[in-house]
Amino acid sequence: MIEQWQQLFPGEDTVGRELVERYSEPHRRYHTLEHLAAMLRVVDEHADLADDADAVRLAVWFHDAVYSPFATDNEEQSAQLARARLGTLGVPAGRIDEVVRLVRLTAGHAVAGGDRNGALLADADLAVLASDAAAYERYTVAVRAEYAAVPDEVFRPGRAAILQKLLDLPALFRAVPSRAEWTARAHENLRREIRTLLGAP
């Protein structure tokens, strides 16, 4: 992963290694280096859809840099970390502002019309929902592991409510050319998981 960081900042490894260490924290099961790498692949494949692909890449690197399953301000803390660290790397103020905005956007994935950077970032972050059935199952197992301390009777309805909100979004994916196919697979996965969580047939 550090090699990918150095594509953005040749020769820089202090901040890059800090981020790798953060995504490698032992309490993480889904919000890991694997998730980071998967998002970067989506951005790299569709970089032409963004107005500033490198700002989107930086937002990917920082969006889950601060992560605790039970915190409510992970995205804000991650945004502030991005501002602090990018400021030491000589990144122009305008790009830092954009990265911070994008990191905050991942809190709810609310993307305004015409926000090409935000649309690509949100699609990359939610791409796991459009995985094949086996990969989606691994994702759900990892998410459950991150919330292992939460009893089933609390986790199941809470998780189902979150998934229903995703199902209810007017547009789950906004930028990728295959968004219709991604949406169909994601909706199937989400509905199946909700049925499992609620014990429905």
Image (spheres, grey):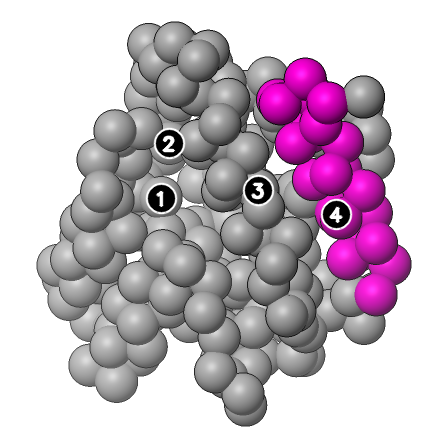
**Comparing labels 3 and 2, the label whose residue is closer to the camera:** 3
Give neighbour class at mark 4: few <14, some 14-19, many 20+ (Cα, 10 Å).
many
Real-space CA distance between mark 4 and mark 2, rounded to the nearest whole angstrom: 25 Å
Tell me if 94 is positioned left or right of 56 in this view.
left
Residue ID for mark 2: 23
Q: Amino acid at mark 2?
A: Tyr
**Comparing labels 1 and 2, the label whose residue is closer to the camera:** 1
Q: Which mark is residue 163?
A: 3
Residue 42 position, x and y percent, is 66, 56
Residue 33 position, x and y percent, is 48, 32
Residue ID for mark 1: 64
Give neighbour class at mark 2: few <14, some 14-19, many 20+ (Cα, 10 Å).
many
> Which portion, as a residue range, is magenta?
180-200
Q: Is residue 87 visible?
A: yes
In primary-sequence order, the first of circles 1 and 2 is 2
> Splitting the image into 4 quarters, where does residue 24 fall?
top left
Q: Secondary structure at mark 3?
A: helix
Q: Amino acid at mark 3?
A: Leu
Real-space CA distance between mark 1 and mark 3, rounded to the nearest whole angstrom: 20 Å
In the picture shown, does residue 132 fall above or below 124?
A: above
In primary-sequence order, the first of circles 1 and 3 is 1
